[in-house]
Amino acid sequence: MLQKKEKGMFKLNWWKDSVFYQIYPRSFRDHNGDGVGDLKGIIEKLDYLSWLGVDVVWISPFFKSPMKDFGYDISDYKDVDPLFGTLSDFDDLVSEIHLRGMKIIIDQVYNHTSDKHPWFIESRSSLNNPKSDWYIWKDPKPDGSPPNNWVSLFSGEKPLSAWEWDDNRKQYYLHLFGKEQPDLNWRNPEVKSAIFDSIEFWLEHGVDGFRFDAASHYYKDPLFRDALKGPQIKKSLFHSVRDEYYWDRFSARPESLLAAEEIKSFMDSYGEKVSVAEIPADMGLCLYLLFTIPGRFDIAFNIDFMEKLSLNAEKVRELSENVDAFFGERAWPSYVLGNHDNYRIINRLTDGMKVSEDEKKSIAKLMATFLLTIRGTPFIYYGEEIGMEDTDIPYDRIVDPWGKSLWPKKGRDVCRTPMQWNNGENAGFSETTPWLPVNPNKTFVNVEDETKDPNSILNFYRSLLKLRKDHVALRRGTMKFQDVPCGIIFYVRKTSKERVAVLLNFSSAVQCVDLTFDGKVLIGSHKESGEKFRESIELAPFESVVMDVF
Ligand code: NOJ
């Protein structure tokens, strides 16, 4: 909630002051005891979220779906899948969230539907049905092969064509993701109007905004030309096959930018809502900026930052300084440590290192401090606030289709395991065996125990969230990086009334930093609040400190 004195000043763009919390609904809390999380389960845990201090709850897809991509394959945009509950449960969820002064955003997946969506079933039924042009259908090449060399983004180490043959139409259809996720044809005005109809449906149900899945892929090259280089292994997180030049074929088309503008202006007619766009990191910041200059989407989910994060202070400083300089006053940045498509932050940062549980705890606090004090809207992925880690999933329990093609590399299941509420059976997530295994570290990484421990990661997050609310400089202030010894990141957030300094020791060595001001600790991973420093400050390995500056 905004402080009273700030109300007039910042009544616009509430989302710049907010902290978002992403819930993967299958894994948050299972209310009906079937091993899968649901909407009523989320309602049960809203007091926890409000205690924690989050402002906006983002719920990943809960719509009707055959669950081939766990809800990102939708078969009815306007209904809740029975696995998660009913539309009336959703309405209850919206009012319970609002009752607690929080907001809700939901996913909207409009690049593709499920192959079981009635639109696709009709479209594939013949060459001349009313929806025959609702998807992207193409004739084969004379030799029967797919119309071009585009590869699916769900390829593993081997290329998977983005085209699937349909025996009925004797044509290929395009699927940038799984073959059960055919791409919609945005160039057909009827498709667009059906999409806007569904956006309107959820706005009428009281949501405060949306996260638009694969938003830069809506429009494809109208000539369907071959991608320039052809498929090759992309050294990204999952090292999957991509095409280096795919972006000009099916990403960042100018028509997709216009779609962003249309969506934004449509949403504006419902008051101030927020639109968060999923834009791939392949083109780095340029694409983010293109999609989020005023009048387009409000926020691009910063996958680039998430994927490039490491414990190298100099690289991370450069990364965030670039974001800040690049966005400047042109657009508003976001920061993200993890999501449902990525390994958990602790695993990524400590991969290949020998670290103790105490060091992991300091690293989790270090990253939390960074996320919640940097200039931009922060997103927390469920469980991050208690230090959840990737869970080992044996091959026979892999459920993510992409995970199967990535094997023996870890897939996405590892970061989607049940929320660890307590140390009991199934970590308090469910009364029955959960859909994915619970991490054995639930014995000490869990909400119940961490709530009682004043030094836990959870209580640290909670204090940081409060600090951010109490200090306008941390939300809206400028950010200036200071020159410091190797391994340290040091910046000052400033408004005309406040100055807050943040010191982060990314190294495993004790470090001493000179201060040009007198400071008092507001929050520290190792130091007590209220401790004063002048001239210099010593930082323990992976220590983080936020200070009031005089
Ligand atoms: C991005 C989502 O985050 C991911 O989970 C999903 O598989 C693809 N888009 C396809 O919808």
Image: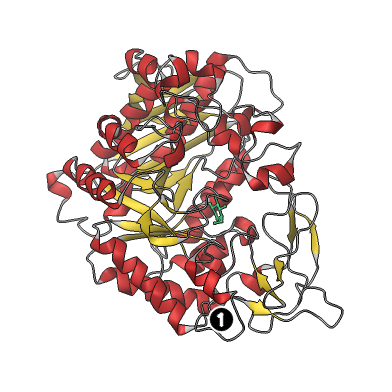
Residue 89 visible (yes or no): yes
The residue at the point 16 percent across, 43 percent down is 99
Indicate the position of residue 45 as horizontal and vertical percent values: 30, 32
Give the residue type that dot 1 points to: Ser
Q: How is the image coloured?
A: secondary structure
Q: Can you say whether 173 is above or below 350 in the image?
A: below
Q: Dividing the image into 4 quarters, which one contains the N terminus?
A: top left
**Towards the viewer: 79 or 240:** 79
Q: Can you say whether 468 is above or below 270 in the image?
A: above
**Towards the viewer: 454 or 44:** 44
Q: Can you say whether 346 is above or below 477 in the image?
A: above
Q: Residue 38 occupies which quadrant of the picture?
A: top left
**Towards the viewer: 503 or 387:** 387
Q: Dividing the image into 4 quarters, which one contains the C terminus?
A: top left
Report helix, strand or loop for mark 1.
loop
Q: Is residue 8 left or right of residue 456?
A: left
User: How many dots with numbers?
Assistant: 1
In this view, the residue farthest toward the bottom is: 128
The residue at the point 40 percent across, 74 percent down is 194
Indicate the position of residue 270 as horizontal and vertical percent values: 23, 67
Neighbour class for label 1 at 10 Å: few (<14), some, many (≥20)? Answer: some
Q: Is residue 540 left or right of residue 476?
A: right
Q: Residue 93 occupies which quadrant of the picture?
A: top left
Indicate the position of residue 503 as horizontal and vertical percent values: 46, 31
Which residue bears the numbered disc 1?
132
The residue at the point 43 percent across, 14 percent down is 424
Q: Can you say whether 447 is above or below 284 in the image?
A: above
**Towards the viewer: 531 or 464:** 464
